[in-house]
Image (tube, rainbow, N blue to C red):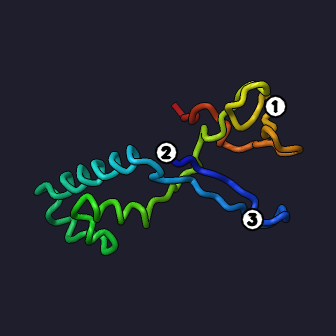
């Protein structure tokens, strides 16, 4: 299983980091996505959609087989939301985790995480 990574591109704080979220980085993720796409295709093929959906999205035209779906997903996988709970908080003495209780990145001097990646869960408006 491949994990994601964030690396510095340069030593300038103004340059964007190199971010690899490792989307679909393991077989489980890819298999799950293939089944989700097939379910969406079955849903949109139902007769109530006949007058609303006139054809596939042009880039997904070859997503009719497992291999085609995998190829499409590898090319277009992205997120439109800020990932949350991706930087595990743990005790400073624990080897696991990205940040300690003070939100300082482990094994890095002077770097603190102050974004949604350290949230334990997504807050909702009820």
Q: Residue furthest left?
A: 47
Q: Is residue 9 above or below residue 105?
A: below
Query: How many marks can you see?
Result: 3
- Find out whether the residues at labels 2 and 3 contact each other: C-beta distance under 8 Å: no
Q: Position of residue 52 (x, y in %)?
A: 21, 65
- Find out whether the residues at labels 1 and 3 contact each other: C-beta distance under 8 Å: no
Q: Earlier in the sequence, mark 2 or mark 3?
A: 2
Q: Which mark is residue 1?
A: 2
Q: Residue furthest right?
A: 110
Residue pictured at 26% horizontal, 70% vertical: 62
Residue pictured at 57% horizontal, 53% vertical: 21
Q: Which mark is residue 9?
A: 3
Q: Position of residue 59 (x, y in %)?
A: 34, 73
Number of residues whose C-alpha sits closer than 10 Å to that of mark 2, classed few (under 14), some (14–19) or many (20 or more): few
Q: Quadrant of residue 100?
A: top right
> Is 82 left or right of 36, judged from the image as shown?
right
* Along the viewing direction, whichever of 64 and 25 lies nearer the viewer: 25
Cα–Cα span, label 2 and label 3? 24 Å
Q: Is residue 42 above or below residue 102?
A: below
Cα–Cα span, label 1 and label 2? 29 Å
Cα–Cα span, label 1 and label 3? 26 Å
Q: Earlier in the sequence, mark 1 or mark 3?
A: 3
Number of residues whose C-alpha sits closer than 10 Å to that of mark 1, classed few (under 14), some (14–19) or many (20 or more): few
Which type of secondary structure does the marked residue at label 3 adopt?
A: loop
* Along the viewing direction, whichever of 99 and 83 lies nearer the viewer: 99
Q: Nearer the viewer, mark 2 or mark 3?
A: 2
The residue that label 1 is drawn on is: 102
* Along the viewing direction, whichever of 67 and 77 lies nearer the viewer: 67
Q: Position of residue 25 (x, y in %)?
A: 48, 51
């Amino acid at each position: 299983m491949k994990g994601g990574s964030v690396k510095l591109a340069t030593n300038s704080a103004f340059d964007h980091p190199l971010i690899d979220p490792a989307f679909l980085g393991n077989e489980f993720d890819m298999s799950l996505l293939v089944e989700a796409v097939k379910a969406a295709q079955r849903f949109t093929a139902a007769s109530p959609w006949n007058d609303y959906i006139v054809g596939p999205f042009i880039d997904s035209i070859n997503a009719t087989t497992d291999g085609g779906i995998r190829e499409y997903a590898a090319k277009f996988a992205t997120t439109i939301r800020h990932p949350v709970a991706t930087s595990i908080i743990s005790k400073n003495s624990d080897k696991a985790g990205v940040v300690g209780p003070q939100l300082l990145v482990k094994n890095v001097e002077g770097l603190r995480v102050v974004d949604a990646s350290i949230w334990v869960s997504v807050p909702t408006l009820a």
